[in-house]
Image (cartoon, helix red, strand yellow):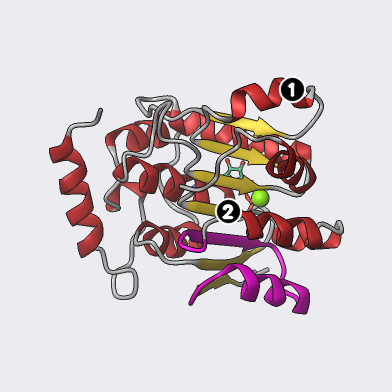
Amino acid sequence: KRDDVDVEQLEQAVEQLDPKNATYTNFTDLPLSEPTKLGLKAAHFAVMTDIQARAIPLALKGHDILGAAKTGSGKTLAFIVPVLENLYRLQHVGMDAGLGALIISPTRELAIQIFDVLRKIGKHGHMFAAGLIIGGKSLEAERQALSRMNILVGTPGRILQHLSQTVAFNVDDLKMLVLDEADRILDMGFQRDVDAIIEYLPKERQTLLFSATQSKKLSDLARLSLQEPEYVSVHAED
Ligand code: ADP
Ligand code: MG
């Protein structure tokens, strides 16, 4: 169990954070937990990219976000850091906490990349259990791990398969949903799967949606999944 004083101080610092009026440059300018600070430092992440500097403060404060920025702009950390921090402050970790965050990615390869970043940043004192659900292993093997996980990264079809077939997969206490590369999720024909997944999730949750491009279909998905979102759009300058 975390030191409650730590969490309380962090909570107050996040409350005081003003995402509209302040300009944050470095990760160390933000109220982040020691484990996350250590993880970012060990991975040599110091200066935030534009999308990170604008999205992370809003996400720390619990807003829903529609974030658009081109490929390579650092969107992964823009949601990994808030996922780690928001679950940390809620102390939503450990065997009995259940699933706190679900991260949906269009492909197995991207899901694995996200999982690797999560592990790299999260391995310095965080206590969450995280898993991948991307198929490839037997449904039964994935199934046994599911009930213990606090953070899951997966592809739409496989996540939906578990939601409909795995009794022990309980998402009732989910706090955060991330839709990464949402434009590609739609391009690959996963709209119906994602709609169906969202049906299973608690309405009261935070949702972060990231995309490299914007489109009509994307705004439809945003309307379905986000509540009063903050729009964070970083335009390419080249
Ligand atoms: P996107 O999802 O927007 O395409 P990624 O999250 O995959 O971008 O990041 C692209 C690359 O930039 C990765 O190699 C990542 O390690 C690196 N990167 C991300 N954030 C930072 C940062 N704040 N400082 C330095 N490099 C970063
Ligand atoms: Mg990405």
Instruction: Name above or below for residue 68 compared with residue 90.
Output: below
Secondary element under disc 2, as helix, strand or loop, is strand
The structure residue drawn at horizontal position 72% and vertical position 68%, both measured from the top left corner, is 213
Residue 160's tag is: none
Q: Nearer the viewer, residue 207 or 108?
A: 207
Instruction: Name the quadrant containing residue 158.
Output: top right
**Placement of the C terminus among the 4 image quadrants:** bottom right
Percent across and percent down for residue 155 are 74, 43
> Is residue 205 found inside the magenta-colored segment of the image?
yes
Percent across and percent down for residue 126 are 37, 29
> Of the residues shown, which amino acid type is indicated by label 1?
Glu
> Is residue 176 found inside the magenta-colored segment of the image?
no
Residue indicated by mark 2: 178
> Of the residues shown, which amino acid type is indicated by label 2?
Val
Extreme residue in the front direction: 167
The structure residue drawn at horizontal position 69% and vertical position 39%, both measured from the top left corner, is 111
Q: Nearer the viewer, residue 200 or 186?
A: 200
Question: Dot 2, how many residues are within 10 Å of its Cα: few (below 14), some (14-19), or many (20+)?
Answer: many
The structure residue drawn at horizontal position 37% and vertical position 48%, both measured from the top left corner, is 86
Instruction: Name the quadrant containing residue 187.
Output: bottom right
Q: Which segment did they paint magenta?
A: 203-228
Question: Dot 1, how many residues are within 10 Å of its Cα: few (below 14), some (14-19), or many (20+)?
Answer: few
Percent across and percent down for residue 5 are 13, 39
Residue 140's tag is: 1
Percent across and percent down for residue 108 are 77, 37
> Is residue 41 found left or right of 18 in the rendered image?
right
